[in-house]
Image: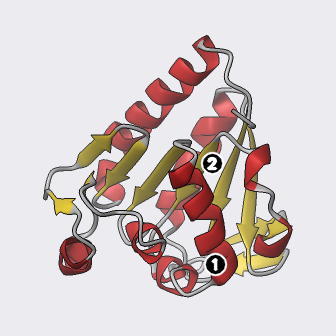
Amino acid sequence: MKALILTSDEFEEAELLVPYYRLLEENIAVDIAAQSRGALRGKHGYPCTATKSLAEIDPNEYAVLIIPGGGAADTLSEDKDAIRIAELFLEEHKLTAAICHGPLVLIATGLMEDRHVTGHASIAFALRAAHAHYSATPVVVDDHVITARQPADLPPFMREVIKHVAMLAARGTSASE
């Protein structure tokens, strides 16, 4: 099983690094993808490296998608490759998890209507405008879509992500299923 984290410069460090290391602890291979391979700088100056470019991503190779927040989510919500990846995950009912401003990328797909979601309070209007059902609760699970509000919600967010990953593993789900 493989996971994919979509990001760009100005990512919220905790929202990228906590899922990254938590998935690695579960022996899940993780790729970090951005507009181009190479060095990225987080919102608070912490560096990380994109191992793949968005253009080279084949979503069928991955079973899990994580979209952190920060300014990166604003950038990705206007990137055709990021939107293409998120769209395929949503359409294929693959595990899709977004935190803070990350749901902006999901909104850009046009596939959030009637979904139950949360996100940072500053994007509640955008979620409602996309005809999603916004809740100010820490974590919302709607079938295969998991959303959370902010870095402080990472513990319950990752509990839900890992619980869903375990269900996929128990079913023997591969990245292409």
Q: Residue at the spot x=30%, y=54% of the render?
A: 152
Label 2: state its secondary structure.
Answer: helix
Kind of residue at badge 1: Ser
Q: Mark 2 sits on what residue?
A: 20
Whole-angstrom CA distance, mark 2 to mark 1, is 15 Å
Q: Position of residue 166 (x, y in %)?
A: 54, 20
Label 1: state its secondary structure.
Answer: loop
Is the residue 154 above or below the residue 122 in the image?
Answer: above
For the N terminus, give its image quadrant. top right
Counting labels gives 2
Q: Position of residue 50 (x, y in %)?
A: 78, 68
In the displayed structure image, the side of residue 52 where residue 142 appears, left or right: left
Q: Residue at the spot x=35%, y=52% of the render?
A: 147
Q: Position of residue 43 (x, y in %)?
A: 51, 80
The quarter of the displayed image where residue 78 is located: bottom right
Task: Name the outermost residue toward the left.
Answer: 136
Q: Mark 1 sits on what residue?
A: 8
Q: Are marks 2 and 1 in contact (CB under 8 Å)?
A: no
Q: Residue at the spot x=79%, y=45% of the render?
A: 61
Is the residue 106 above or below the residue 17 in the image?
Answer: below
Q: Residue at the spot x=74%, y=81% of the render?
A: 35
Q: Residues within 10 Å of mark 1 (few under 14, many from 20)?
A: many
Is the residue 32 above or below the residue 44 in the image?
Answer: above
Task: Name the outermost residue toward the top.
Answer: 170
Is the residue 36 above or below the residue 52 in the image?
Answer: below
For the C terminus, give its image quadrant. top right
Q: Position of residue 135 (x, y in %)?
A: 14, 56
Kind of residue at badge 2: Tyr
The quarter of the displayed image where residue 26 is located: top right
Disc assigned to residue 72: none
User: Mark 1 or mark 2, which is nearer the start of the sequence?
Assistant: 1
Q: Residues within 10 Å of mark 2 (few under 14, many from 20)?
A: many
